Image (cartoon, grey):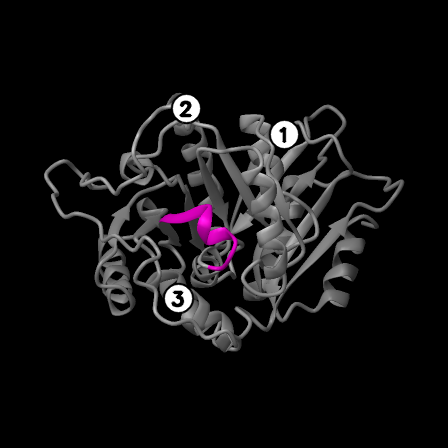
Amino acid sequence: MKIPVIILSGFLGSGKTTLLLSLLQESKQRGLNPGVVMNELGQRDVDGYILQEHTGMTVEKLLDGCICCSRKEELGECLQVLLARRPDAIFIELTGVANPEEIAYALLEAPLRDRLTLHFTATVLDAENTLEYNSRLSADRHLVRTLRQQISSADLIIVNKSDLVEQETLWKIEKAVRKQNIEAEIVYTHYSKINLVPLLAGITPRELPIPAPQRAPQTFKSAAMTRVLPDSGGTALKEHDTAQETSYSQVAALTLTFPQGAPAQLTRRQFETFFRECGDNLLRAKGHVILSDDEPVQLVQYAGMRTSWEASSYPGLPYVVCIGLNLNEALLTERWSALFRS
């Protein structure tokens, strides 16, 4: 029996890892043994550690690049490692600049096609920023195309952080989504909370004699909704162009570390001011930082002009990964160093 694969897609900071955490918690309650592939654009593992910290799971990590282009050759090896553990399902969380279509095509190539089947592709959108991305990111035409493909290839569109915008904005998002994808179900939510039953429908522990996974007719919305999700299953994929271009061209990740022997700790306000003063070029920032000796390590995350904080047990040296469009790395590094001299 082929192992079902669920692909989680969506731009930087949209809420993919939060959704994956929910999927892993639900899987545990169902007695499932899932495998996880986590792709990070930066050199440091942030989201993978979050998953391990919250679930205790072993996560296969592909760092410093995108598995739909620059790190694509490593995806097969990573999946073979997971297959050796005999998982009941595999979840692949893509970096925010990845094209999920490329991953779907990779699953159809030998030898993976004999062992794996695409069960679902879910794309998470940030309700506060989705409508602005085409203009804000217009300098990188590859990235704009990728964001459209994240929508067009999805079975499910999750409009996250919908509680932060007006209803009129949600209507505009739906109209924009329908230009790219007329079949996928659209769910409006916050904290990536959705009905997980359809995503996991038919996935059972391997020792149980249950038929291969099938899409369930349940809806992600209320019980009053009856539309059945389309079955993409990988069987209707169009002929693939093997000369696929890169999924982005002007996005880069920069890891900032704390200077050795730095005399002073930074405050939350200093971090938040630093992120804000980077302007629109900074798309995402995340890392594990130390604020003071009497506080636990903090997981800091910046996305959509908002910064969040969460206590963490991270044992390593503090750092922040900045991801942005046409980042001036020299200037950013200098501004970072200046924080510790003030």
Q: Is residue 164 above or below residue 1?
A: below
Q: Nearer the viewer, residue 336 or 303?
A: 303
Q: Report x, y in % for residue 166.
A: 27, 53
Front position among marks 3 and 2: 2
Q: Residue at x 45, y 50 (%)?
A: 114
Q: Residue furthest right?
A: 261
Query: Bounds of the magenta span?
Result: 109-119
Tell me which amino acid carries mark 3: Gln
Q: Report x, y in % for residue 170.
A: 26, 56
Asked if residue 269 shows in the view, the reply is yes
Left or right: 315 in relation to 68: right
Asked if residue 308 shows in the view, the reply is no
**Could you classify mark 2 by the number of other residues whose Cα lies within 10 Å: few (under 14), some (14-19), or many (20 or more)?**
few
Say which element carries label 3.
helix
Say which element carries label 2.
loop
Quadrant containing the N terminus in the rendered view? top left
Circle number at residue 312: 1
**Mark found first going from the N terminus, 1 or 3:** 3
Whole-number angstrom distance, CA of label 1 to CA of label 3: 34 Å
Circle 3 residue: 149
Left or right: 129 in relation to 170: right
Q: Report x, y in % for residue 120.
A: 35, 48
Whole-number angstrom distance, CA of label 3 to CA of label 2: 37 Å
Q: Residue at x 60, y 32 (%)?
A: 58
Is 118 included in the stretch rendered in magenta? yes
Tell me which amino acid carries mark 2: Glu
Q: Nearer the viewer, residue 69 or 22?
A: 69
